[in-house]
Amino acid sequence: MTTNLATYSVVLTYSAMAVYVIAFISFALDMAKRAGEVTTAAGGGAAAPAERTVATVQGGTVVLEKVDSTAGRPGGGGTKFERVGMAMTILALVLHVGATVLRGIAADRVPWGNMFEFSLTGTALITLIFLLVQFWQNLKFLGVFITGLTIILLGIATVNYWVPVVPLQPALQSYWLVIHVFVAIAGTGFFALGAGLAVAQLVQTHRQGRPASGRLRFMETLPDADRLEVLTYRVLLVGFVLWTFTLIAGAIWAERAWGRYWGWDTKEVWTFIIWVVYAGYIHARATRGWRGARSSWLALIGFAAVMFNFSVVNVFFKGLHSYSGL
């Protein structure tokens, strides 16, 4: 029975990947469609998007910024390719969650006890956060980034990380596995979303103030660099709070499991490095006035550290946290 459930989980995983590919293609076609519409508008074939002025408070200062009037409206202003991409992403997530649940039932525990399961659950949560954030802000333009990242991470997991269902190691048989790891995965989801926004901000910053060209014309339909920077900061702030809890919870679990809160294990060190990078990003932006490309690059350095911690430290570095199952 366990073997059958694990097999069905793999089948659903591959099915989800196939649907994610369709979603990725749809979001890419949406970008091409946006670029075509902008070109037509520039040639006089359509009206430019309406703008409105919004007052926001940043550090006690009221800032006026122009915002696309269609931005942030649920489902507003999207092309048919965007709608297809969102529908396929939701369908892929349903299959993805099904694969994760079946893996958990087969293992009779939470499905993040090794690298394959962590990858399976982590990518599902990244996609779920992307979809839920749409109720707060229209960030569908990040669909190509999120679905592309999910396809890559799931592909690596199924090819390199898959292992049969096995019992948990003694140190992992704790309720802290549910709390600590789940919050870490959630924090990673917000870091991934922030990285996508930071990339978009870098592109917008590069484009602004330069002569218009036919390259990346779809970026004209996205928020400007200042607005993207604000969104990046807000998303990463949520991720930082979750990662802070992850660090604290990990120390408490370490004391319960090994009798010390901190032992300079490789995994502990890299978790702290990630925290320091994002703390530096938040501090520099809030108190030192870092704006523009510098803040975006620091955000991307933080996400690179997260990916290094996930893909290299978990697999190649030996220590008390060697639970990859490989």
Image (spheres, grey):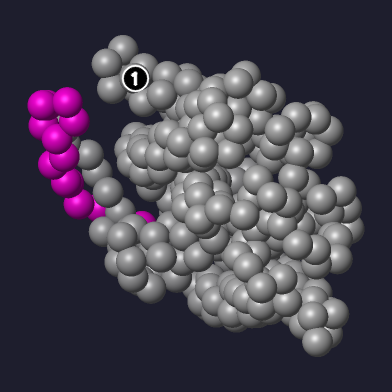
Image position of 208 (left or right of 241): right
Q: Relative to 299, does residue 315 appear above or below in the rendering?
A: below
Question: Are there few (<14), some (14-19), or many (20+) residues within 10 Å of tag 1?
Answer: few
Query: x%, y% of residue 60?
Result: 10, 26
Give yes or no for residue 91 being in the magenta stretch.
Answer: no
Quadrant where the image shows the N terminus = bottom right
Residue 146 image-quadrant placement: bottom right
Image position of 247 (left or right of 16): left
Question: Identity of the amino acid at label 1?
Answer: His
Residue 236 seen: no
Local SS, label 1: helix
Q: Nearer the viewer, residue 194 or 252?
A: 252
Query: x%, y% of residue 295?
Result: 44, 24
In percent of the image, x 12 and y 26: which residue is there? Answer: 61
In percent of the image, x 63 and y 68: which residue is there? Answer: 109
In percent of the image, x 83 and y 33: which residue is there? Answer: 316
Q: Main secondary structure of the magenta part?
A: strand
Q: Nearer the viewer, residue 38 or 92?
A: 92
Q: Nearer the viewer, residue 30 or 283?
A: 283
Image position of 181 (left or right of 289): right
Residue 77 seen: yes
Query: x%, y% of residue 11?
Result: 81, 79
Q: Relative to 209, does residue 250 appear above or below in the rendering?
A: below
Q: Relative to 194, does residue 32 appear above or below in the rendering?
A: below
Residue 90 image-quadrant placement: bottom right
Q: How many marks?
A: 1
Query: Which portion, as a residue range, is magenta?
Result: 48-62
Image position of 2 (left or right of 201): right
In percent of the image, x 79 and y 76: which residue is there? Answer: 6
Q: Which residue is mark 1?
A: 283
